[in-house]
Amino acid sequence: MGSDSGNVQKREQWGSRVGFILAAAGSAIGLGNIWRFPYLVGKNGGATFILVYLIITVLIGLPVMLAEFAIGRAAQKSPVAAFGALKVNPFWSVIGWMGTIAGGFLVLSYYNVIGGWTIRYMIASFTGLMDAAATADQSGAFFGSFIGKQAEVVLFQVVFMAVSMFIVLGGIGKGIERACKVMMPLLFIIVLVLIARSVTLPGAEAGLDFYLNPDWSKLEDPTLYLDALGQSFFSLSLGLGIMITYGSYLGKDERLPSASLWTAGLDTLIALLAGFAIFPAVFAMGFEPGAGVGLTFITLPAVFAKMPGGTYVSFLFFLLLFFAAVTSAMSLMEVATTFAIEKFSLRRSDAVWLMGIIIILLGGYSSLSLSGPPKITIMGKSKDFLDAVDYLCNNVFLPVGSLLACVFVGYVWLEPAKKELTSDGKFAFPWMGAWTWCVRVISPLAIIYIFYMGLAW
Ligand code: PHE
């Protein structure tokens, strides 16, 4: 490997096509797939939502991902330095700066906190969670007392972050790629095992009914489209410079369109499967599915506590969540790391330490805010720091970052982007016309719509 300082070093590349796709899918498949997607399906009319989500992902999410891959591969630089390397107006570097600050620092800082919870719950599955969570109320009390113990929350946040840092220290091939090649297949197997457990419980059909029964009247409800759009961007890890960063480690022999199809396809598959693992069990055990953190850390432990073999099912579920979270966290960590390597000419190891410590400190603030006073008021609503950062990223940075990427690729850098998508004419891309339409017209309009509606919430 030799010295890995700054720009002089030869840029590392993914070791294999499969490794790159698993890493990109690892970033995309995260907490959003396991708790948010299934819940949104249930809330928005089952199969109706799935259909709209698929259409939106193909027409809007995929084209933006392709744009990000193209920028990254053409520039072979971090998102902040990429636009300089493409020799365009320096204004466009704003995409890289915003993505790095929002993704590498803000999103990662609170993602770590939740990642830490998954480790705590894995351990707790064997050490009393099943007794403590005999009813939903008791399970809620367990969760409340855990997040109230500041030292413990911070400790697990640091442990989780240390795992991501350790992997990113290894670099692209020996770190991220190798970790994803192990964790992603395991994640897939765990989902299948959990589905098998869940659908064989007596009374599981009610859950399948809730999850999949199409309610076409929901098509008239605008929140369905809003939910689907927001979820598609978040789930595909768009708008934060991640796919630019991952694309920058690719060579010209990779077909970008098929890579993005694989990434989005695997992401959607795991999201759909997560619903089959969760809802049949929730209904079979007589619970109501709620949203988000409540469903994952309060309802599900109570569901597991009631079922035969619950201890192991609980452990497996939180292990699944841990794998999903850590492979996403490392992609965010890599954005911060490449930034520091290029901007300050640091060695990778120094960059990881420096960025890691800053992110841990920020996350510490999120952790403490869960049980203490630091509250922030946004649009008249008081939120703790973790919620406020989450809100800001999902409703502002993510859509604005994606919108700028579309406008940049669609109107400023279209011809070079087209060349990039075909690897300078080496591969055919029959969908070029459709893609151009999507990045120039359909995606920007749709994003402006979510941005506007999201702020109005
Ligand atoms: N895609 C991840 C998920 O579904 C979340 C994420 C968003 C990760 C943006 C990195 C960047 O949970």
Image (cartoon, rainbow, N blue to C red):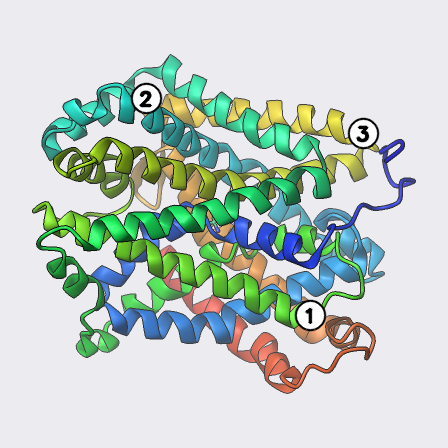
Image quadrant assignment for residue 354: top right
Number of marks in the image? Answer: 3
Which one is closest to the eye, mark 3 or mark 1? 3
Which one is closest to the eye, mark 3 or mark 2? 3
- Looking at the picture, how far across and down is residue 3, in whole percent? 89, 31
N-terminal of the two: label 3 or label 1? 3
Distance in Å between CA atoms under marks 2 and 1: 43 Å
Residue depicted at 51% across the width and 48% down the height? 184
Disc ID at residue 373: 2
Residue depicted at 60% across the width and 74% down the height? 439
Which one is closest to the eye, mark 2 or mark 1? 1
Distance in Å between CA atoms under marks 3 and 1: 31 Å
N-terminal of the two: label 3 or label 2? 3
* Mark 1 nearby-residue class (10 Å; few <14, some 14–19, many ≥20): many
- Can you identify the residue that label 3 sits on? 347
Q: Is residue 353 visible?
A: yes
Quarter the C terminus occupies:
bottom left
What amino acid is at disc 1?
Val
* Mark 2 nearby-residue class (10 Å; few <14, some 14–19, many ≥20): few
